[in-house]
Image: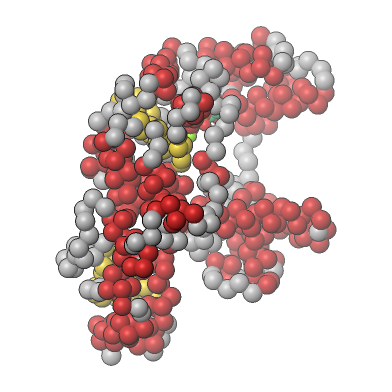
Amino acid sequence: MNPQETWKSAYHQLELQLERPTFETWLKGAALLNVEEGVFVIGVGNTYARDMLQLRLYRTIRRAVCDAAGETVELRFEVCQNLPEPEVEADMPLFRLLAQQDPAEVGVPLHKQIARPQRPELPESELNPRYTFDRFIAAKENEMVYAAALAVAERPASNYNPFFIYGGVGLGKTHLLQAIANSCQSRGLRVIYVPSEAFTNDLVDSIRNRTTAMFRERYRSVDVLIVDDVQFISGKESTQEEFFHTFNSLYTYNKQIVLASDRHPRELETLEARLRSRFEGGLVMDVQPPTLETRIAILNSWAREKDISLTQHVTEMLATRAKANVRELEGVFNQVVATAQLTGHKLTMDTAVEIVEGYHRPRHHITLAQVLDTTAKHYGFRAEDLIGPRRTGAINIARQVAMYLSREITTASLPQIGDAFGGRKHSTVLHSCNKVAADLLVNPVLQTIVKDIKARLIKEQ
Ligand code: ADP
Ligand code: MG
């Protein structure tokens, strides 16, 4: 059988196996585009079908194709413009989606659907109470962006909408975004602050759990929607599409939208043009690195807050040498506080210099691949075993330990770790890390294992 015949046979098989609405909605019209090194590339009509097939039907379809081919193959789904598009109302992909998923559910009123047990609020959406306008030192270089943020917080949707802040890491974007959120929330406005990665995860979860109506309800019923690090939605088509509709809906009802990114919207290369033009349609401002004077002012303000006294020389030295951004300054300052509290003495210049130098000494640069490899080896497995789907006892433990170590000694984020472990969810990674951390408290054998693997990683690099 050639690949086209294989696909045809699998396709018919699936038509019989799957429930009618499922097949009609997601798979009907799907075509084999080509085969690349054992990967069947299957074209589908839209991004929802692609995500749905990838997330929920991958195994079923793969089994059918493998059976037809008589060998193991992998699949990839791609959106293909030339396929006959299933009719989807342009403005309401998710409501439509919900209706298509389960016809029995269409008539269920929204409040009943919402009453179903749901996972609690996203942990990522929690606000840091320390990120307030009071605690932001607005020196000359950031006077304007501070004033604009304050204006947005005081009168949402009447001044600058959307309000877009961009700039390098550690310069206070998240601080300003959350200051807006804290201020609005304290006046009783409904606010969502969400890093864009969490928005994406939430969307994918809602498609998987059939709670898309709730997803929309949640994001569209706020007074102020704040999305941080929007650079991460670049290139993610279905997220962008949903975000576009969320954006329009809020904007139409005169609700405030606030965004932050590491660069200007025009430099977000894979951002859809229509979203970019929405972003640029409001006020776009950047945050600037603090000058030496500002860094000194920030240190003085923190020292007052912590009731710590630093000599002027020490403060100047710290501000001169911790100059990359405010996050670095904060890291150094926290160590200064810890040392001062530990010794109970006034901090000497020597100790302060030691702290800054220690902070700048290169850290271990251990990659996720190294953690995977070394941990797998320690348990007698291969890295692929930990990446793969098997969940037997020993593999599962090794995998959890590897996730824990990845979080502890690499700089990767939870979603990045999840990706490295075969596309697992960030909540799974978090769960594993917490579990291992809890076990470590009571399990001396595990303590030794973790210590050994760490030592090996550091030695091998
Ligand atoms: P970004 O989101 O731009 O990467 P953050 O908002 O996370 O940066 O800032 C890093 C740290 O520096 C935070 O703890 C924040 O409170 C602090 N910070 C940044 N700018 C200022 C400032 N002008 N005044 C006081 N603290 C600041
Ligand atoms: Mg940030």
On-image quarter of the N terminus: bottom left
Residue situated in front as seen by the camera: 363 or 450: 450
Residue 18's x, y, as percent? Answer: 36, 79
Which residue is at 32% across, 43% downward?
246
Q: Is residue 9 visible?
A: yes
Residue 440's x, y, as percent? Answer: 76, 55
Above or below for 391 versus 352: below
Residue 183's x, y, as percent? Answer: 49, 24
Left or right: residue 66 versus residue 4 is right
Left or right: residue 162 versus residue 419 is left
Above or below for 262 versus 37: above
Residue situated in front as seen by the camera: 276 or 258: 258
Which residue is at 28% across, 28% downward?
282
Which residue is at 64% across, 74% downward?
392
Left or right: residue 193 versus residue 50 is right
Q: Residue furthest top?
A: 312
Q: How many marks?
A: 0
Above or below for 454 versus 53: above
Indicate the quadrant where residue 212 lies.
bottom left
Indicate the quadrant where residue 89 lies.
bottom left
Residue situated in front as seen by the camera: 441 or 125: 125
Indicate the quadrant where residue 107 lies.
bottom left
Residue 338's x, y, as percent? Answer: 74, 27
Colouring scheme, one of rainbow, by chain, secondary structure, one colour: secondary structure
Which residue is at 38% across, 56% downward?
109
Q: Is residue 380 visible?
A: no
